[in-house]
Image: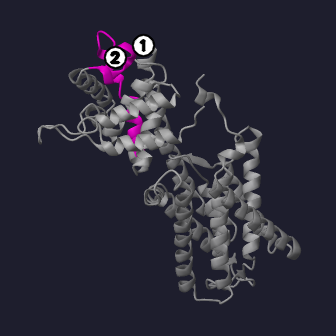
Amino acid sequence: MSAEAGYRRPGWQTIDPGQALLMATAGLVVLVAVTEVAAVRLVQPDMAVFFGVLIALGELFRMVMPGNREVAPVGTAGALGYALLAGVGGSPDGREGAGFLDVVPATHSPFQVIAVAAAGMLVGTLPHLAVGRSPRPDAMARRLLTVAIVAFLFRPILGLHPAWQVLLAVMGVVVVLSCFLEVLVTAVLRAESVRFGIAVRDEIRAKLALCAATNATAMLIAVATTVMGPAALLVFTAPILVTQFAFRRYAGIRATYLQTVRALSRVTEVGGYVETGHSRRVSRLAVAMGRELGMSEEELLELEYAALMHDIGQLALGDPIPGGATVLASPAEQRRIAELGAEVIKQTGVLDRVADIVRLSSHPYRTGRGDAEPSPPLAGRIIKVANAYDDLVGDSRDRDRGAAVLERLRLDSAAEYDPAVVEALSRVVDRRPRH
């Protein structure tokens, strides 16, 4: 077992200050909300129970999207729908043709919305805890605070008795604003490891479609429940369920790709072509360097794939390179290994861009041949530097050895290695623990 694998930080140290502040804020809001509801009692308890059950079911069937993002579309739609609820089930006297607001008014407060949402989340989390699946408190806190923002912005407007057209417009503005704020908060939390602008772009790409579907469903639930009563919860939850299954399948495919690539990367280790753990170490270094250089999440995923499989072309060699250190091979041999690896990867039919990265990762930073040779992409330049570093350092934690290798890479930066990438590697290595 390596020193890195054997070292584990205490659980409390895995929570960064931003996440701790987020969870503390959510906990304080819930405490205030529960206290307020306990003092004045539940308003329209039957509807609170209906929405609480929907939120609990949504939490029960939550999922993890690419990028390790935990989401609960059904639960979020239910909680937002409760925050946006204007009335319940038609007019009190049963008159036909009742207007949008000629119904039993929904008079619950923003604090009741928060208390019901928190209770539903807690109940939906209990089965996960029972089978040993730890919850993501930071993700739950973000969802709860999003609901709280919508409730505090929207529910006071109901007291003004606006026209239904105005009310619908306000609903739309509030849910869009809540989605934007959630993206912003998540990006701020991720800004520790990724540039803020890149984090915002990644979150928008990852959450835009799901956020639109969730918010639209929340509005449908609120409007339909005002007209139809609790039956609308069953009817209008169906669209978000379909969306959730589609996203779950997409996330499953992405996870399968990564598992397959990781399995393929070990073939060279099992066959004795490279040292044990080489592909994994190069991948971790490359992804850390990519973050340092501001690559987007999609680019980082392709970089991880390419870094894991960058040496797969060695399987075609008659005589393995001693220690698998391609940095010690001739430029022609490096080029041949990269070309063979790219051809193998292209056979998948879905990783053509990854294959191009692997093929060009053997090229020098400056080819010196004008336009005859394509310039390596950033991902290829990163893999070239990460591979050279690990070939010469391996799993050693000797700081002097690492510093000597970095100096060697800097001396070759005029043509062979990208100087900016080498400096990114230096910063990544400096942050690694000594033991």
Q: Secondary structure at mark 1?
A: loop
Please name the residue shown 37% across and 18% down the image.
Answer: 324
Q: Which residue is mark 1?
A: 271
Chief SS of the magenta region: helix
Disc 1, disc 2: CB below 8 Å?
A: yes
For the image shown, how many numbered marks are present on the structure? 2
Q: Nearer the viewer, residue 378 or 353?
A: 378
Q: Left or right of 314: which side holds 254?
A: right
Q: Which residue is mark 2?
A: 315
Neighbour tally class for label 1: few under 14, some 14-19, many 20 plus, Cα within 10 Å: few
257 lies above or below 337: below
Q: Which residues are magenta?
A: 300-329
Spatial CA span between label 1 and label 2: 8 Å
Quarter of the image with the N terminus is top right
Please name the residue shown 40% across and 24% down the image.
Answer: 392
Q: Secondary structure at mark 2?
A: helix
Q: Nearer the viewer, residue 169 or 9?
A: 9
Q: Horizontal and vertical percent for residue 137?
A: 69, 52
Please name the residue shown 69% across and 82% down the image.
Answer: 103
20 lies above or below 130: below
> Mark 2: which amino acid?
Leu
> Residue 321 lies in magenta, yes or no?
yes
